[in-house]
Image (cartoon, rainbow, N blue to C red):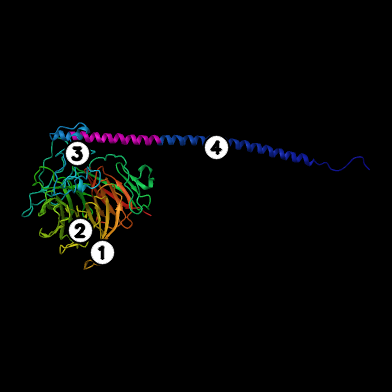
Amino acid sequence: MSVYNHRPMVPAAQSRIVELLEAIRAEFDQLSQEAMICKSQRDDLEHKINGQIQEMNAFQQSLFDMERTQKTVKQQYEEEIARLRQQLEQARSGHAPMTSSAHSAQHPQPPPPNIGPQSNLFGGIMNASGGSGASTSQPGLVAPPQMSDQPPPPHGGHYPPPQSQGYPYPPSRSGGPGTPNSQAAPLPTDQGANKRKPVAQTGPAPLPTAPTPGRPVSTPKQPIPAAATGGGFTDLDPDNVPPNMKTEGSDWLAVFNPKIPRYLKVDLVHTLDHTSVVCCVKFSPDGRYLAAGCNRQTHIYDVTTSTRMCVLQDESVSKDGDLYIRSVCFSPDGKFLATGAEDKQIRIWDISKRRIRNVLTGHEQDIYSLDFSRDGRIIVSGSGDRTARIWSMADATCLHTLRINENDQKDPGVTSVAISPDSRYVAAGSLDKIVRVWDVQTGHLLERLEGHKDSVYSVAFMPDGKTIVSGSLDKTLKLWQLGVSEGRGFSADRDRKNPCKQTLTGHKDFVLSVACTADGNWVVSGSKDRAVQFWDPRTGNIQFVLKGHRNSVISVATSPAGRHLFATGSGDNRARIWSYEPIGP
């Protein structure tokens, strides 16, 4: 046996495992170092991002502060410009300029004279703080005075608009027999001493126009009126309303009811400035034009462009004192415009000729409301003389005098009239808190709708012709079911003791005007609380509250041609056209 072991030599298994472990440890250490480096880089990036976010937040806050400062400065500049413009106009008209608002407060402009026997259509609307204006303020139907929070325009003066331009229109012709020598009044002239002289025309006479006046003035946000019946909303701070439930312009704010679904969006289309209170607004039947009644003048605007098409003014009337146009109404064909004023006369204007076609006389006090029938055959008027009258457009005669004869009513002056869509009925609101309905053909009284606690200032028929909406000094609207039976007038089996379908509460002050949209889906109201409210007549809920005026909203009107537009007239000397659109799916 050999002394040597001839088995083959092999490396030990333990040394191989050690080598593998060392390699794994080295790779782990390398990966750990790379992870530490990545973590460090991540921390650096997060720190930089956080710093940038803080810088952006600070920048955003600075922008908000600058915007608030800019709005404040802008408002101050606008107020100063308005004050200087007033002084300039007063200097031109021969009056000593006012140098401060305190001076204006010490020498306020006197309100127009009281008119009407123991009636109070506009008395106290602009100045009273609320409550029953019909019984507390002085007697007489008085025109709304100028705003208390801005300087009134100078007596007989105008704020000069931008230079106007011509608009083609049929030439004027002289009126027929008995037509007063009246024509459209010239628009306010441009600034400067030189006034334009009329130029002879051989073709169609150009109609004066005036673009929409300057920029709006910002106003502070105001609380939203109190809760409405059935799902309304209480006083809200606009700053606390979610952004999707409000729409804000430079000087207006719309807040939507957060307790119900939002169906509409609203926007300002045009602002139409005037030199006096805007007592009434009305769309033409085709929705193309808007008429606004002011002191002595009625302005007609193109709704699309806001161009002032013409200014109608009876030049035969004495220039002494004021003469507010209380109501305007287009004929169904859009050719004529009826105006009612404080001089007890109803003027029927031929718009294309800009002349008076007929003057309807017979009322003994101011004319406060007018309405044409859908067929254009009759026009109804309401007056402070306690009557509504039905007139024939064919021969300008009075067909019926609808007189309020109740001796127990202290002051039954008629404030508002409306004709049903089928031209069969006339509704009238009056200062004695009652809404009355007459038959157009016979002139017989059919209904006395009682329930308001104060004077009724506005009435309107819903498109179905069976429901009347009324607005009152008691700060509410009411919906009345008439129960019209075809061919028989009002049905006898209806519960006459409770014809009120709904009472809509939400305004904080007098409800001065009501209107209904052409589709009947919405009721619109304007109030002394400076707000416009959109109501759902099926539920009684407020859809939104619109703050867009600096004084009472005296008149509201909706476009009857299916266009989603409505207009407002206010004591702040402005008429405004708004759009309301359904929110898409």
Quick check: is 328 in the magenta stretch?
A: no
User: Callout 4: 10 Å neighbours few (<14), some, many (20+)?
Assistant: few
- Does the residue at mark 2 contact the one at mark 4 (Cβ under 8 Å)? no
Mark before the other along the chain sequence, 4 or 1? 4
Q: CA distance from mark 3 to mark 2?
A: 38 Å
Number of on-image labels: 4
In the rendered image, residue 148, in percent from the top left (x then y), is placed at 22, 39
Query: Callout 1: helix, strand or loop?
Result: loop
Q: Give how far across and how far down residue 313 sits, in percent.
A: 13, 47
In the displayed structure image, the side of residue 238 where residue 393 appears, left or right? left
Q: Say left or right for 352 vs 506.
A: left
Q: Main secondary structure of the magenta part?
A: helix
Kindly indicate the quadrant of the structure image that contains residue 485: bottom left
Give the Cα separation between the discs numbered 4 and 1. 76 Å
Kind of residue at badge 2: Arg
Is residue 336 visible in the rendered image? The answer is no
In depth, the one of 571 and 268 nearer the eye is 571
Q: Nearer the viewer, mark 4 or mark 1?
A: 1
Q: Quadrant of residue 146?
A: top left
Return the residue at label 1.
483
Say which of marks 1 and 3 sits in front.
1
Tell me the amino acid under the disc marked 4.
Answer: Arg
User: Which one is earlier in the sequence, the residue at label 3 or at label 4?
Assistant: 4
Q: In front of the other: label 2 or label 4? A: 2
